[in-house]
């Protein structure tokens, strides 16, 4: 079949290129309540390629499909049709259990509401992904402490989320997303609830991660100023990418 031949060709081309895109999405559709009277066609044949180490913002009006797209990239929900290749792997070829492991090892999530476990301390929240992966408790604890210290949270290791500020909660969430060193970090309004100073701190932190570890960041925001911290801005309208705005947007910070 032509479709299959095309698919093989895409895979071969993909394997051959040197600087692989970390993420390739083609003709992605998502319908909620498929076939029912309340069906919503949230993604309508979306195409997007993201290169390794990109720091990208997604903007667009409410309801245009931004969260749906992140959920598809993160494989938190099933697509209706289309192709998603992450790190050279066509994710439709993975079994459910392979997908779970793949997601755990390759993708970090940072949500607006942080989704921290309220009854776990900062360090316990951060070590959880390692424990789930089977890392020994003592080792996981040490790594979690190290990362939190690096993020300036060394004196809040044993505090519960509600005992620290919004910005500090966000740092815990960032640490938890980073502890596995995922290739891709997805953020849905990751600075949504933060004041502008704390937002700027979080964006600086993202840029640091991006520069040091070459991790790829895909951040949804409706704040233009936040988006301009990224390398480029992908604009979405009605379930597709409508335009891409290339940065840099900001003047270089003067040396202090
Ligand atoms: P955005 O994040 O850009 O605001 P969403 O991706 O959340 O947009 O939603 C895109 C469209 O899909 C909207 O019309 C929304 O109402 C609909 N939608 C989102 N999630 C669901 C769901 N679980 N069930 C049905 N419709 C949904
Ligand atoms: Mg949303």
Image: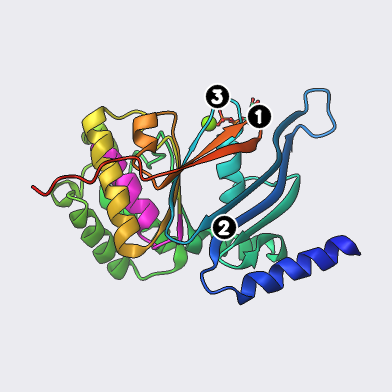
Does the magenta stretch mainly form a helix, a strand or a loop? Answer: helix
First in sequence, mark 3 or 1: give its number.
Answer: 3
27 w.r.t. 161: above or below: below
Instruction: State the separation of the CA atoms marked 2 and 3.
Output: 24 Å
Task: Please say whether residue 174 is one of the residues in the magenta stretch.
Answer: yes
**Quadrant that contains the N terminus:** bottom right
Q: What residue is shown at x 69% (from left), y 47% (from top)? A: 78
Query: What number is the disc on residue 238?
Result: 1
Query: Is residue 75 in view?
Result: no
First in sequence, mark 1 or 2: give its number.
Answer: 2
Colour convention: rainbow
Query: What number is the disc on residue 23?
Result: 2
Query: Does residue 172 appear left or right of residue 107 in this picture?
Result: left
Query: Does residue 78 appear left or right of residue 113 in this picture?
Result: right
Q: Quadrant of residue 139?
A: bottom left
First in sequence, mark 2 or 3: give its number.
Answer: 2
Name the residue nearer the viewer: 14 or 145: 14
Element carrying mark 3: loop
Q: Give the range drawn in magenta.
A: 167-184
Query: Is residue 185 in view?
Result: yes
Task: Please say whether residue 180 is one of the residues in the magenta stretch.
Answer: yes
Instruction: State the separation of the CA atoms marked 3 and 1.
Output: 10 Å
Q: Quadrant of residue 238?
A: top right
* Residue 23, horizontal then vertical, whole percent: 57, 58
Q: What residue is shown at x 55% (from left), y 43% (from top)? A: 70
44 w.r.t. 18: above or below: above
Ligand 1, what quadrant? top right
Element carrying mark 1: loop
Residue wearing tag 3: 62
Q: Is the CB of mark 3 within 8 Å of ligand 1? A: yes
Query: What number is the disc on residue 79?
Result: none
């Amino acid at each position: 079949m032509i479709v299959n031949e095309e698919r093989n060709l895409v895979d071969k081309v993909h394997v051959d290129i040197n600087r692989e895109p970390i993420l390739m999405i083609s003709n992605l559709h998502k319908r909620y309540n498929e076939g029912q009277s309340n069906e919503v066609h949230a993604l309508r044949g979306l195409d997007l390629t993201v290169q390794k180490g990109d720091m990208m913002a997604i903007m667009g009006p409410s309801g245009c499909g931004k969260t749906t797209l992140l959920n598809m990239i993160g494989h938190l929900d099933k697509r209706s049709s289309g192709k998603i290749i992450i790190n050279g792997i066509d994710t439709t070829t993975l079994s459910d259990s392979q997908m779970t492991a793949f997601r755990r090892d390759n993708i970090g999530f940072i949500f607006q509401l942080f989704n921290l476990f309220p009854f776990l301390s900062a360090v316990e929240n951060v070590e959880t992904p390692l424990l789930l992966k089977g890392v020994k408790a003592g080792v996981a604890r040490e790594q979690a402490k190290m990362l939190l210290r690096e993020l300036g949270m060394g004196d809040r290791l044993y505090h519960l989320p509600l005992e620290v500020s919004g910005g500090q909660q966000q740092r815990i969430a960032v640490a938890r997303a980073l502890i596995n060193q995922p290739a891709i970090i997805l953020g849905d309004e990751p600075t949504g609830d933060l004041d502008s100073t704390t937002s700027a701190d979080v964006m600086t932190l993202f840029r640091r991660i991006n520069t040091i570890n070459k991790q790829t960041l895909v951040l949804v925001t409706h704040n233009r100023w936040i988006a301009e911290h990224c390398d480029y801005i992908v604009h979405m309208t009605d379930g597709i990418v409508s335009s891409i705005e290339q940065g840099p947007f900001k003047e270089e910070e003067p040396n202090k």
